[in-house]
Image (cartoon, rainbow, N blue to C red):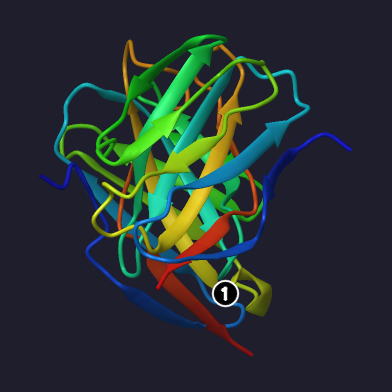
């Protein structure tokens, strides 16, 4: 039962353009969502998060949008840079659970071409 | 520098042997977690601990064991009962507060031959 899904295994974008990574979830108890970036053979690093009481959160080039009715969130990276090339994981936490007990999507490989 | 240290980075074991993966944090975080990553899959939770001397099973705890005798340390033992132990193992920690992120170590690649 995949509660968090990233349906696009990969995304290729030209440098300077927008990257949009998508994530869908099924568990209506999820109330906090995070995006992590991961390089091969390394641990994930936190990028940005959003609480279910918001529909948008921005941090520099990164913006996360949350559509609760559609159970969908997306990460926008503008402008995309070659250093953004990595695997991006969407993660969610259910209300009332342990603080870091996250459910992850399968990941999307982002490649930004110079 | 504060952070989470996992050791070793690469580990090889023969089938049927137990192996213990180390995870130490100096972030003064109360909660610690173990995740497993397989190719093409997301991270899956093995065990987690919110306080010393207490831990709970995650989604895929079978074949694994943990201990939390110190706040800084959360070692994971992969036992011979784990049917597919070869994977990338990630340790994480977080503060005991809602709406906060978990911080991850660099991971241990375990290969069982």
Instruction: Tell me where residue B60 sits by quadrant.
Output: top left
Does the rendering let one see residue A101?
no
Instruction: Name the residue at the bottom extreme.
Output: A114
Q: Nearer the viewer, residue B29 or A62?
A: B29
Mark 1: which secondary structure? Answer: loop
Q: Nearer the viewer, residue A95 or B64?
A: B64
Specify the quadrant that holds the C terminus of chain B: bottom left
In the depicted structure, whether residue B59 falls above or below residue A54: below
Identify which residue is drawn at 34% across, 15% down: A97
Instruction: Tell me where residue A86 sits by quadrant.
Output: bottom right
Instruction: Name the residue at the right extreme.
Output: B1
- In the picture, measured across the screen, residue A3 lies left or right of residue B95, that is left
Does the rendering let one see residue A50?
yes
Q: Which residue is mark 1?
A: A85
Q: Nearer the viewer, residue A49 or B54?
A: B54
Q: Nearer the viewer, residue B16 or A61?
A: B16
């Amino acid at each position: 039962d995949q509660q968090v899904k990233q349906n696009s295994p990969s995304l290729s974008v030209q440098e300077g353009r927008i990257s949009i990574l998508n994530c869908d979830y099924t568990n209506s108890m999820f109330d906090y969502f995070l995006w992590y970036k991961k390089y091969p053979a390394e641990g994930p690093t936190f990028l940005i998060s959003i609480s279910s009481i918001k529909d948008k959160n921005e941090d520099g080039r990164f913006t996360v949008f949350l559509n609760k009715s559609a159970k969908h969130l997306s990460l926008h990276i503008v402008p995309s840079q070659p250093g953004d090339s990595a695997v991006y994981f969407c993660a969610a936490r259910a209300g009332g659970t342990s603080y870091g007990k996250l459910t992850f999507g399968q990941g999307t490989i982002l490649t930004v071409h110079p | 520098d504060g952070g989470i240290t996992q050791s070793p980075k690469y580990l090889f074991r023969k089938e049927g042997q137990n192996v213990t993966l180390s995870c130490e944090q100096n972030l003064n975080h109360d909660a610690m977690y173990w995740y497993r990553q397989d190719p093409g899959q997301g991270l899956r939770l093995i065990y987690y601990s919110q306080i010393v001397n207490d831990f709970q099973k995650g989604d895929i705890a079978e074949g694994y064991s943990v201990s939390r005798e110190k706040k800084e340390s959360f070692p994971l033992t992969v036992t011979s009962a784990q049917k597919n132990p070869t994977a990338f193992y990630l340790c994480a920690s977080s503060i005991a507060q809602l709406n906060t992120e978990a911080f991850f170590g660099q991971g241990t690649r375990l290969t069982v031959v």
